[in-house]
Amino acid sequence: MLIKKGQKIFVKHKRKGSFNAIAEKDFDTEKDEWYPIILDDDMVDGLNTDWVKGEHIPARRGLCSVSLGSKK
């Protein structure tokens, strides 16, 4: 799936849980290994790191799935 810069997406991550994000730049979920996304929720707790709204959050194709739109 092609994701365009600025699109709101919902991410289900195996280690970080589910959260809303915004695409930092264009990417393809089928071809790109890493997804350039910015957190759009208040906070996400990872295994070793916490991210707050507006921070770049690492998302790898094998560990997460994305869908268009935001959910709560």
Image: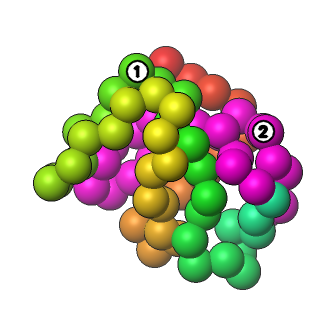
Mark identifier at residue 7: 2
| Residue 1 location (% of width, % of height) | 79, 62
* Callout 2 amino acid: Gln
Image side of residue 41 versus residue 14, left or right: right
Q: Give the class, few, some or many, for how many residues have Cα within 10 Å of label 2's Cα (few <14, many ≥20).
A: some
Q: Residues within 10 Å of mark 1 (few under 14, many from 20)?
A: few
The part of the image, by quadrant, that contains residue 42 is top left
Q: Vertically, is 47 above or below 70? A: below
Query: In the rendered picture of this protein, how many numbered marks are placed on residues?
Result: 2
Regarding mark 2 in the picture, which secondary structure is present there? loop
Taking the image as shown, residue 44 lies to the left or right of residue 62, namely left
Q: Does dot 1 land on a helix, a strand or a loop?
A: loop
Q: Residue furthest left?
A: 48
Residue 72 numbered mark, or none: none
Q: Position of residue 30 (x, y in %)?
A: 71, 75
Any mark on residue 42, and which?
1
Q: Which residues are magenta?
A: 1-25
Q: Looking at numbered disc 1 in the image, what kind of residue is underneath it?
A: Asp
Quarter residue 35 falls in: bottom right
Q: Position of residue 41 (x, y in %)?
A: 47, 25
